[in-house]
Image (spheres, rainbow, N blue to C red):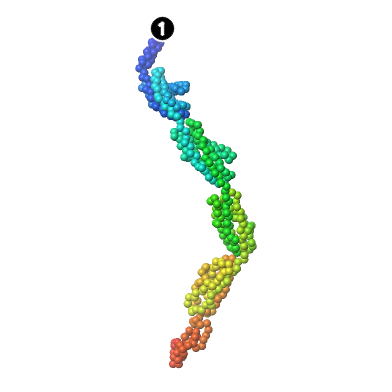
Amino acid sequence: MKSRIISLFSVSFLLLFHTLIAYGNSPPIIDPGGPYIAIAGETIYFDASGTTDPDGDTLTYLWYLDDGPPQFPSNNPITTHIYEDHGTYNAILTVTDSYNDAVQVEVSVTINPNSSPQVDPGGPYIAIAGETIYFDASGTTDPDGDELTYLWLFPDGSPPQFPSSNPITTHIFHQPGTYNALLVVTDSYSEPVTVEVSVTINPNSPPQVDPGGPYIAAPGETIQFDASGTTDPDGDTLTYMWYFDDGSPPQFPSNNPITTHIYDEPGTYNAILTVGDSYSDAVTVEVSVLITLNSPPQVDPGGPYIALPGETIYFDASGTTDPDGDTLTYLWYFDDDSPRQFPRKNPITTHIYKDIGTYNAVLAVNDSYNDPVRVEVPVIISISHCNYYLPGDLNDDCIINLSDLAIIAAGWLTDCNTEPIDRSCTPK
């Protein structure tokens, strides 16, 4: 009996305590956010996260939106909704705390009509068959600032492209003609906007190929094949590919119109040049190449050369010629045990002989295609500049005149036995 009395007392106490607490509960303070403004079809975020409860109670949120059924209660203060039609609405938010105290507020919602995109497809577009065209609709705008998607349709039998957020795309028309490209732009809230833009495709003109030449060279000579006179009526970028009919492999295509090649054997050849502009069939032309045997240089070493011991001699082979007009190199050899010179393009060199004697200087001339041509030239080194001994030439001017007679007259008074240092006594 005693335990029953205690139990009843405990229950009564708890009921009383709970009742007292319930009577002291404060309702939530609601902040529904807003007012909300959007366009028809746009997702609105209703945000009541500013709502508070003085007692720190757990709250539940229930939104009534007056264009459809109410949502389910949730502990999340944020929800979303889409109004499909423009107009003015009142959204109702009911917030309940843990003790079922419910507070209800309204918030206004203004839904404006959506504006369609203002589509600018660019163009009109003009290109040649096979050329890549950049279709640019970046001038398109949307009054509501909506994100847009672009879909291009081309009437040349190609499949439609996928919708993209990029307003720029590319396309190639392979046949000349006039086309109407379609651009479909949508902002996700209104009906898509479709516009046309004209595309004119002109036929491509092939390159006008000039291979240079005809070419003439010697075996082993480097030939520069020059097709820089080639033009393209459309201003297209060109590629060049040369084929040489001497068994050498074809060269790789290049944007450079100039290339080089060496034929090793004499003969008549046909070099083939193929030029492409990427839009039309490549153009192929032939050019003749004549490979003839090279003629050796015609060497003129100058001379003969006469000088005094220690005198600088200028050896001049500038009279040397080459029938083929080749560039020549000159190498001189001097037979007085002096160091060998290096080959040079200058036909003139210098040398000094220190001792009296008769020498043979050797000149080797090379044109790069033949064996060097060697010639000898005599060199006389003496104390006299005369090529011969002239009796009576007492002053070494290679002639006999009154000056020599004056020396003879003075010599009448000279005894070479007693005065050997006299000029008249100098031996030949």
Category of crowding for the residue at label 1, using alpha-carbon neighbours closer than 10 angstroms: few (below 14), some (14–19), many (at least 20): few
Image location of residue 157, percent across then percent down? 59, 39
Where is 280 relative to 427, above or below? above
Q: State the residue lying farthest toward the left.
A: 24
Secondary structure of the residue carrying numbered label 1: loop
Image location of residue 90, percent across then percent down? 41, 23
Q: State the residue lying farthest toward the bottom.
A: 412
Q: Which residue is mark 1?
A: 1
Most foreground residue, 163 or 236:
236
Residue 216 seen anywhere in this rendered image of the structure: yes
Picture residue at 47% right of the left edge, 21% below the top: 69
Most foreground residue, 282 or 63:
282
Three-letter residue code for mark 1: Met
* Quadrant for the N terminus in the image: top left
Q: Is residue 137 rendered to the left or right of residue 51? A: right
Image location of residue 406, percent across then percent down? 45, 89
Q: State the residue lying farthest toward the top.
A: 1
Residue 260 seen anywhere in this rendered image of the structure: no
Numbered label tally = 1
Picture residue at 51% right of the left edge, 35% below the top: 194
Where is 114 relative to 56, above or below? below
Image location of residue 143, percent across then percent down? 44, 34
Picture residue at 58% right of the left edge, 40% below the top: 156
Where is 68 relative to 121, above or below? above
Most foreground residue, 408 or 215:
215
Residue 101: quadrant of the picture = top left
